[in-house]
Amino acid sequence: MMKKYISKTVIAILALLSLVACEDNDNEWPTGGTPVVRYVRPCDVDASDSLLTGGYLGSKIAIIGESLAGVNEIYFNDKKAKLNPNMVTNNSIIVSIPNSIPGIKEDLIKLYTSEDSAYFAFATIVPEPTVKSMACEYVEAGDVAHIDGLYFIDDENSPLTVTFTGGVQGEIVSQDITSIDVVVPEGAESGPVTVSSIYGDGISAFHFRDQRNIILDFNNGNYPDYDYFFGWHGGKGVTSDGGISGNYLILSGDIDETGSTDDKDYCFDRWTYTPEDADFADASNLSDQVLKFEVKVTGDWSAAALQFIFTGADEVWLNWQNNAAWPDYEDTHGGNENWKRSESYPRGLWTPWTASGSFSTEKWITVSIPMDEFKYGADGSERAVKSAGHYSGLTIWMGQGSSVGIACSPTLWIDNVRVVPID
C-alpha cells in the first residue's frame, strides 16, 4: 500500500516539475542539428498514410523528419507561417499553410533554426477563383457589374478574365483578390459567369440576368388578368423608366414607426389563378432554394418589413369569374386577406434598415432570402414553414415586422422576383 502511495506521489511531483519547466521555457526554442524533412502528410487521421507534394492555402499539414525541435520559423514560398511551439517536436511539426497568395511562387517549405536552415520541395496550391455573388445580377451592356468572391489573381503571364454566357469577355476596370468590377460586354446572355485565373476557372452558381422560374417581372401579357394587377392591389403601378429589365413595380407612401402602411401604397398581389396552379417552389426541399429579386430604394427606409408571402388557393385566389367551377374555394377569392397580417401565417421578411437605422441604395441591387427563412409571422415571430400547395400565389407587402423604427416615406422599385437554386 505504501509503495503505491509513494509511486503516485513521485508521478505527481514529476508532472508538476514538467509543467513548471514548460512555463519557464514558453519563449525558448530547443536547439539541435540541421533540420531534415523526410516527407509531409495530412493531419487528417483517415488520410495520415498519404504523402503530400503540395497543399491548399489554409490547410493543416504535418512535416515529418529529424532535428526539427530547433525550428523557430517556417515559410511557404515568401509567406511566413504561424508556428506554435507546442506543435513542434524533434520529429514532427504541425502547421497551417498561410492563407495568403505567394508573391514569389518557388514551391518550397523553408525551415529556419537560430543557426541553420533547410528547404523542402512542396507546392503551395492556390484554388481556382470562387465566384460568390454579383451586386446586381441585371446589368446592361456597357455598364459596370460588381462581382464578389475569392482568389481573383491577376498574373502578368495569365491575366484574369471574366467571361459571360454567350462566350464574350468583359473589360476588367478594377480588381483585388475578393472583388472585380467589369464592364458588361455586348452579347452577354443569361447564364453563369466564369472568372479565370492562372490557377483555373471559377463558374458562378448564380445566373447573370437570371431567367429561371420568374414569378413576377411586371411585364404586360405575362400573366392572366394583368389589368387587375393579379389581385386587389397594384402598389403605385409599374413603369420601365430607369428600369433594368422592362417594367418594374413601384411601392411608395408613408410608414409610421410601428410599420403601419396603406395597402394601396405598399402592397402587390399575384394570387393563385386556379386551384390547379403549380407551386413556384419545391416545398420538400426549401433549404436548397432562395427567393431573389432586384430592388432600388430611394429615400431613407427606417421602419416596417418588406414581406413576401406565398399563398395557395386555400388562402386566396384571383379567378372569381369561375367560382362555379371550383365551389370549394368560393370563400377564399378576392379580399379574404386574414393571412396577410396574421402573426401565425409564415412569410419571408427583409429589413435591411435595422442594421444602421435607415437604408437606401444608389443603384439597383440583388437581394436573396433563403426559402427556409419563410417562417415568420407578420410581427416577426417564428412559425413553421408552409407545406406543398401553398406556393402558387405571392403577395409583396410592406408592413409591421418585429422592430420599431422611425416614420419614413421611402420608394422601392422591385423587379424579377424568382425562386432559384441557392448559390
Image (spheres, helix red, strand yellow):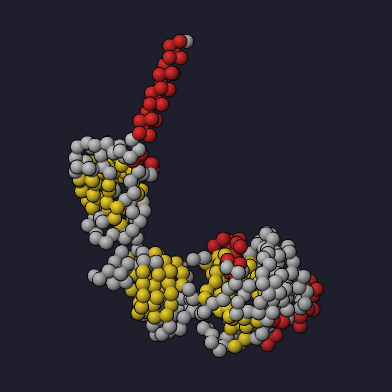
Compared across the picture, whether 137 is left or right of 23 comes to: right
In the picture as drawn, the residue positioned furthest to the front comes out as: 24
Which of 387 and 96 lies nearest the eye of the viewer? 96
Which of 214 and 264 lies nearest the eye of the viewer? 264
- Residue for point 47% across, 10% down: 1
- Residue for point 33% across, 58% down: 100
Q: Position of residue 337 (x, y in %)?
A: 76, 73
Compared across the picture, whether 176 is left or right of 36 comes to: right
Q: Is residue 29 above or below residue 365?
A: above
Q: Position of residue 230 (x, y in %)?
A: 68, 81
Q: Is residue 43 above or below residue 250?
A: above
Q: Position of residue 305 (x, y in %)?
A: 65, 70
Which of 176 and 224 lies nearest the eye of the viewer? 176
Q: Is residue 371 above or below residue 73?
A: below
**Is any part of residue 45 visible from this angle?**
yes
- Residue for point 54% across, 85% down: 243
Which of 147 and 393 lies nearest the eye of the viewer? 147
Quadrant of residue 25 within the rendered picture:
top left
